[in-house]
Amino acid sequence: MARRRRPLVPEAREELDQLKVEVMKKKGYQIEDPDQTKFEVAKGLGIPLKEKGNQDLSSHDAGRIGGQIGGSMVHELIQRAKDQLNKQ
């Protein structure tokens, strides 16, 4: 099972998962389950990622996977904030 970090606001978990799926779909990934996002991204990057036991995965490759996901989410949140400020 995937290790899950607790968000600063635990009640936000569901919305963050929904954002993850939405953002990655915009990037062309076919994702329905947020827990499968890292596997789809890894596959797209050509990085072998297993359900369990990824101790042989380099930190560089792990960063490429996580950076693709987290970076896209941060970019989307910044864009939404800018759009909201422009509406005011």
Image: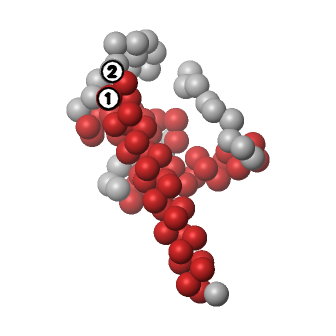
Residue 8 vs residue 15, the one in the foreground: 8
Residue 1 vs residue 55, the one in the foreground: 55
Residue 74: image x %, image y %? 50, 55
User: Please, which residue is most extreme toward the bottom here?
Assistant: 88
Residue 61 — which label?
A: 1
Badge 1 marks a residue whose secondary structure is helix
Residue 81 vs residue 35, the one in the foreground: 81
Colour mapping used in the image: secondary structure
Q: Is residue 26 left or right of residue 2?
A: left
Q: Disc 1 marks which amino acid?
A: Asp
Residue 9: image x %, image y %? 75, 47
Q: Quadrant of residue 41?
A: top left
Q: CA distance from mark 1 to mark 2?
A: 5 Å
Q: Residue at x 46, y 59 (%)?
A: 75
Residue 15 — which label?
A: none
Q: Residue at x 57, y 70 (%)?
A: 81
Q: Disc 2 marks which amino acid?
A: Ser
Q: Is residue 71 visible?
A: yes
Asked if the residue at tag 2 contacts the one at tag 1, i.e. Cβ–Cβ closer than 8 Å, the answer is yes
Q: Residues within 10 Å of mark 2 (few under 14, many from 20)?
A: few
Residue 38 position (above or below residue 17):
above
Q: Quadrant of the C terminus?
A: bottom right
Residue 26 position (above or below residue 42):
below
Q: Is residue 40 visible?
A: no
Q: Residues within 10 Å of mark 1 (few under 14, many from 20)?
A: some
Q: Is residue 26 left or right of residue 77?
A: left
Residue 57: image x %, image y %? 34, 19
Q: Which residue is mark 2?
A: 58
| Total numbered labels placed on residues in the image | 2
Q: Is residue 48 left or right of residue 21?
A: left
Badge 2 marks a residue whose secondary structure is loop
Q: Residue at x 57, y 52 (%)?
A: 18
